Amino acid sequence: MLRWTIIFIIIAVIAAIFGFGGVAEGAASIAKVIFFIFVVLFLISLIFGRKGI
């Protein structure tokens, strides 16, 4: 999931360089959402992984 965030950030940067503002903004917002989902899932797995058996 973190890989998808990096891909969307790269797309946003390339689109911003070439002047596609709408595409850059959309890709950046998608990357932000995916990153926050990743952080939440990581914290949940960290909490439940500690309890073990």
Image (cartoon, rainbow, N blue to C red):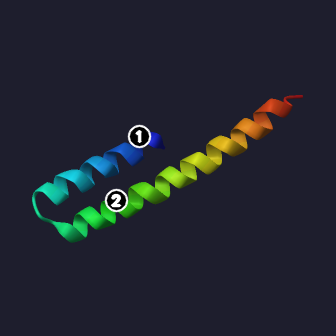
Query: x%, y% of residue 40?
Result: 63, 50
Quadrant in the picture for the C terminus: top right
Would you name the residue on which mark 1 appears? Answer: 3
Number of callouts in the render? 2
Q: Residue at x 46, y 41 (%)?
A: 2
Above or below, comparing residue 51 to residue 41 in the picture: above
Query: x%, y% of residue 13?
Result: 22, 52
**Res. 28 mark:** 2
Horizontally, is 50 left or right of 46 in the view?
right
Above or below, comparing residue 17 to residue 1 in the picture: below
Q: Residue at x 39, y 63 (%)?
A: 29
Horizontally, is 22 left or right of 38 in the view?
left
Q: Amino acid at mark 2?
A: Ala
- Nearest the viewer among 4 and 35 is 35
Horizontally, is 4 left or right of 25 in the view?
right
Query: x%, y% of residue 34?
Result: 48, 54
Answer with the quarter of the image where residue 31 lies.
bottom left
Query: x%, y% of residue 17?
Result: 13, 55
Q: Residue at x 10, y 58 (%)?
A: 18
Q: Amino acid at mark 1?
A: Arg
The label nearer to you, 2 versus 1, is: 2
